[in-house]
Amino acid sequence: MKSTTDVDGWRPPAASMSGEDVAAGTRAAPRSTLERKMKTQGEIEAAVSVAMSDFMLTFIGRGPKSIHAHLVTDMVLVRVEGVLTVAEQRLFETVAPGKGRELFKGLRSHLVESCREMLDQMIQASCGCPCISMHHDISTTTGEEVFVFRLAKVPEMRLKKHS
């Protein structure tokens, strides 16, 4: 007869299993509703990356070459690479030093700030907790953009199951 204890040491309550399931030890552990709604850290990071990519496409007009999101305690760090268009890159090369960069950074900062409420909702939907502050910068040299979202609390996550 097989044990009803699975690899993680979880023992199902006998009342929720039929006699055959108990004897065979085949019934999967029922997950609570809360656990089903909770995401792993990787799922949260992936959701943020997809949402940020959609934001870039919709409001900036083009998607990034790459995007990486990292959840670090109560912060979400998002690094977006390849966000400058050819026209923007030429602006930095042809206009007087610093002038094109100031113009571009001001425009991009204004655009991001005007979409702040939408970005906050996007982060809350991805992480499950509200965003209390956001910081943003873009490098006109590397074409890399960085967002830092400070969350109201550390998101609740389920642990990734190792197989």
Image (spheres, helix red, strand yellow):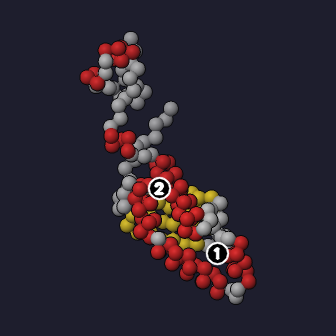
Circles 1 and 2, Cβ within 8 Å, touching? The answer is no
In space, the residues marked 1 and 2 are separated at their CA atoms by: 25 Å
Name which residue lies at 37% across and 67% down.
132
Where, by quadrant of the figure, is residue 98 drawn?
bottom right
Disc 2 residue type (three-letter): Leu
Between 99 and 52, the one lying in front of the other is: 52
Spot occupied by residue 163 in the image (x, y as percentages of width and height): 50, 32
Dot 1 amino acid type:
Thr
The answer to which image quadrant residue 67 occupies is bottom right
- Asked whether, in this view, residue 140 is left or right of residue 93, the answer is left
- Residue 119 shows up from this direction: yes
Instruction: Identify the residue at horizontal 71%, vertical 72% (top origin).
Output: 86
Q: Height in image: 153 above or below 2?
A: below
Percent x, y of residue 35: 36, 41
Question: At 38% from the left edge and 11% from the top edge, which residue is drawn?
Answer: 1
Residue 7 or residue 126, whichever sits in front = 126
Given this view, does label 1 or label 2 mark the residue nearer the observer? Answer: 1
In the rendering, at what x and y percent does residue 93 appear?
Answer: 73, 80
Q: Nearer the viewer, residue 122 or 82?
A: 122
Give the residue at the far top of this rendering.
Answer: 1
Number of callouts in the render? 2
Residue depicted at 58% across the width and 69% down the height: 60
Identify the residue position indicated by label 2 in the image.
71
- Residue 75, horizontal then vertical, whole percent: 44, 61
Q: Which residue is mark 1?
A: 140
